[in-house]
Amino acid sequence: MFAAWRNWRDARRVRKMGFTAAQWEAAVADWPVMARYQGQERDALMAMAFRFLARKSVAPGGDFAITDNMCLKVATMACVPVLKLGLDWYDGWYTVILYEGAFIPNRPHRTADGVVHARGPVLAGEAWHQGPVILSWEAVCQAGGASNVVIHEMSHKLDMRHQGANGAPPLHEGMRAQQWYDVFSRAYQELLEDYHHHRPMPVDAYALTGPGEFFAVCSEAFFESPDTLFRDWPALYRLLAQFYRQGERP
């Protein structure tokens, strides 16, 4: 009964927002990933992006002027990871804060050397547990290659659904936690070896920050550069395909 009421509420809010298919297409036209979503999948992604904006507010950081097209693009990028999982995977938080450029969190920050600074480092994105997702519009527009700040932060939100952002999101029935741990740990160690020996790396070195960042960076690559990720780490790719229920390969 609650699901039916929620769907009715979402539909009512979407009608009030008045977004059109043409407006959505224009907002996402310059994102190459969209070429993989056609037909019914594309229609489903558009509908989910509209419902995302019915459930979440997009608020400006500072005096940044946000447009509907910005909101539609961010919402679509956010919905790609949950297209086959469902929008309910983003329950428990309500706001996206969009800055024009990089931002500095106004809170104490402890660096690796143990020094506590009054403010944090400059960021392009951040996800708070049971709090907002904060994004730089400049970074959103730089999506490509193997990078996507929206997918990165949204994957943290998925990860946080199970014991925090530790690189171990809640797995579906039939997926084995030990296999997930073994495959991701092996890939992490390979990346660490590549980094120490100055070899080309399958994903950005930021993934070495910790297990949560490793999962988020690999998720970016899964959607933005799937062929490269599959070539370099086929076992890890297949686990992400199982988790996101997309991109299955033989």
Image (cartoon, rainbow, N blue to C red):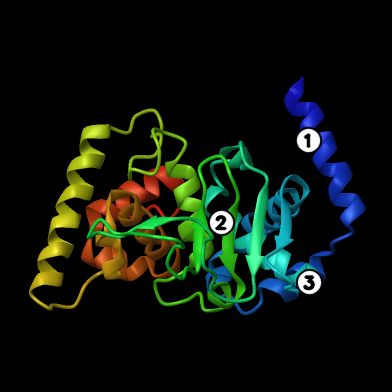
Query: Residue 107 vs residue 41: left or right?
Result: left
Q: Would you name the residue on which mark 2 appears?
A: 80
Q: Would you name the residue on which mark 1 appears?
A: 7
Question: Which label number is shown at residue 118?
Answer: none
Q: Secondary structure at mark 2?
A: helix
Q: Nearer the viewer, mark 2 or mark 3?
A: 3
Residue appearing at x 53%, y 62% in the figure: 150
Along the line of sight, the residue nearer the viewer: 242 or 49: 49
Along the line of sight, the residue nearer the viewer: 134 or 89: 134
Q: Would you name the residue on which mark 3 appears?
A: 67
In the rendered image, residue 54, in percent from the top left (x then y), is placed at 78, 48
In the rendered image, residue 71, in percent from the top left (x then y), is placed at 72, 64
Instruction: Give the class, few, some or many, for how many residues have Cα within 10 Å of label 2's Cα (few <14, many ≥20).
Output: many
Q: Quadrant of residue 204?
A: bottom left
On-image quarter of the C terminus:
bottom left
Q: Note whether 211 is above or below 203 in the view shown.
A: above
Instruction: Give the class, few, some or many, for how many residues have Cα within 10 Å of label 1's Cα (few <14, many ≥20).
Output: few
In the rendered image, residue 118, in percent from the top left (x then y), is placed at 44, 61
